[in-house]
Image (cartoon, coloured by chain):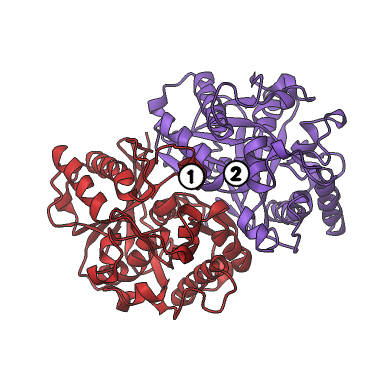
Chain colours: A red, B purple
Amino acid sequence: MDSKRAGNQTVVFGSPPVILASYSVVGPKEGQGPLGKTFNKIWKDQLNGEKSWELAESKMLQEALQGSIDEAGITKDRIDFMLAGDLLNQIVSSNFAARQIALPFIGVYGACSTMALSIALGSMLIDGGFAEYVLIGVSSHHDTAERQFRAPTEQGNQRAMSAQWTVTGAGSVLLGKQGVGPRVTAATIGRVIDYGETDANNMGSAMAPAVADTILNHFQDLKRTAQDYDHIASGDLGTVGIALAAEVLKQSGSDMGTVFTDCGIRIFDSTQDVHAGGSGCACSSVVFAGDLMQRLKAGELKRVMLVGSGALHSPTSALQGESIPGIGHAVVIEA
Amino acid sequence: MDSKRAGNQTVVFGSPPVILASYSVVGPKEGQGPLGKTFNKIWKDQLNGEKSWELAESKMLQEALQGSIDEAGITKDRIDFMLAGDLLNQIVSSNFAARQIALPFIGVYGACSTMALSIALGSMLIDGGFAEYVLIGVSSHHDTAERQFRAPTEQGNQRAMSAQWTVTGAGSVLLGKQGVGPRVTAATIGRVIDYGETDANNMGSAMAPAVADTILNHFQDLKRTAQDYDHIASGDLGTVGIALAAEVLKQSGSDMGTVFTDCGIRIFDSTQDVHAGGSGCACSSVVFAGDLMQRLKAGELKRVMLVGSGALHSPTSALQGESIPGIGHAVVIEA
């Protein structure tokens, strides 16, 4: 088999694609959080002048995509493909953003793992010789997601302590074949794992086994351990999910030590009343496009694994009593 | 730029991936249609013993995926990636099928263009050196789609004459790096085009401009005309959409002649009361996996272009008065 494969689930890039630019836009609550200073743009409210939350989310995604194009300083017509996804039914935030950006468009669905999945796919398109530049953008919005998956926020329902707070934001990266910046060196595509969790207010538990499975397969495929990374960031396991994932990994012989963190835990602090942490496609995308990219570029981090975590249910499947399938996709980025 | 690129939107495969197997499962109405004999399996009713239409759709997709694996005669553990998508919110039919199949899973959303998009992506993963085998499956179900996008079928609403009938079915192909079978030689990734159509009962009009745009760009990128193809099949433009697309193409200097057909028109006949034709992700996937693959393998067709057509709206965006963005993705398959 080809040298670009390692083990069962991992690909290794021959000429690692470069992250030429990244851009993040967030809502006010995210801006007030501990990572507030790492975001490029903070909206003053959840609508920013749009007439619906859905249009606001798509506008936010457009701003993030355009931000990466501008930061990279290339003209849009040099970009070969745009990859995007979000949580909304039929990924409409992405579709409407793609209508404005007008690039050849590949729609991706990986729920909250979409950023890592898109970086993995985009890197394969570049390293495979099919693209010189790939634009990636991923969004979520607290109020669109709550209304769609749980209950309208106007209803003011009490939230479970295991619930997470869907991040309002959009993160984008522009990948290139050549140039200066952190490089995507490997990716591990996850399998769907479902241990029977049915509580849509406990996504961390639903996703933890899949994240642990992907990390274990990644280590096995590349013959690495947690000690080979400065930082391993899960997407949005939250406090409940990361404890479970760490325990599964430990029992499987992989002690994660102190390098294992979660974007959903880092994006809000305990005073912000988000309970188990942040979630949503935007959670890992803005933390990666902001904080992690800045620390990679500063040389503070040398090798980072981003493990996007996705809960692959739908409002309909949840109402029909189905359990929540989870998935984890990992990408390795090196300074 | 790399030799695998042609023009603005097209990729050309250096070592064209082989379609090693294909499999199609359909509902009873599709089985009674003019292409009935080309399908591998025909369900006797819309549920086939499952307790919901949604579970039935996912089961149908699993059967199609397993059918391709069995036909190819390889063991499942040799498959590197599974790519799948469908019309349901959060592509749950695919997610639940991926849970059963347990392969590294990449979720794709292109609405009814998903089969062509997945074949394009899967071919890039193989020709790029990242996979030896890629399994692809795409489904739709009349009753799940009608309930989600329009109205529950039990309601018995009168259907508009421009409306199309969502196909109940699932189509699958297994792509390989080497072997015997028709080959995927090129792909053109489409841009989102939206001319302002807002009628969810007139998808053909919404998608026609995007399909025409992709075909025109494909011809321009590869310096070809319609005469270079035995058969150009749009996914599900229906009678309304194909007339519009053909007219746009003609006015742009590309007379499509008699090679331009539509899977949505071919899958049902005029006695089946489907109005403008078939639609849904399954429409082009089962016509491709059945009829077109059989004619390619028999040598009756030498070079086919499948142009998947997708309407990228959601039930929410339609209710909010947004117009319907369209997309077309093309793949070229040669005997």
Question: Please, what secondary structure does the residue beneath circle 1 have?
Answer: strand
- Most foreground residue, A242 or A221: A242
Please indicate whether residue A202 sits to the left or right of residue B174 in the image: left
Residue shown at the point (43%, 40%) measured from the top left: B105
Numbered disc total? 2
Q: Find the distance from the CA under tag 2 to the CA under tag 1.
A: 12 Å
Where residue B27 appears, as percent x and y from the top left, is 67, 26
Q: Which quarter of the rendered picture does the C terminus of chain A lie within? A: bottom left
Contact, mark 2 vs mark 1 (Cβ under 8 Å): no
Chain for mark 2?
Answer: B
- In the rendered image, which residue does mark 2 sit on? B87
* Side (left or right) of B85 relative to A227: right
**Residue A70 shows up from this direction:** yes
Instruction: From this view, report whether residue B169 is shown above or below residue B249.
Output: above
- Name the side, left or right, on which B29 lies relative to A253: right
Q: Nearer the viewer, residue A61 or A125?
A: A61
Q: Which residue is mark 1?
A: B107
Characterize the local packing of mark 2: few (<14), some (14-19) or many (20 or more) Cα atoms within 10 angstroms. Answer: many
Secondary structure, mark 2, is loop
Q: Position of residue A37 (x, y in %)?
A: 31, 79
Left or right, A202 with reference to A84: left
Question: Residue B292: where, in percent of width, then height?
Answer: 70, 29
Q: Quadrant of the N terminus of chain A?
A: top left
- The answer to whether residue B254 shows anywhere in this view is no
Residue B198 occupies quadrant: bottom right
Identity of the amino acid at label 2? Leu
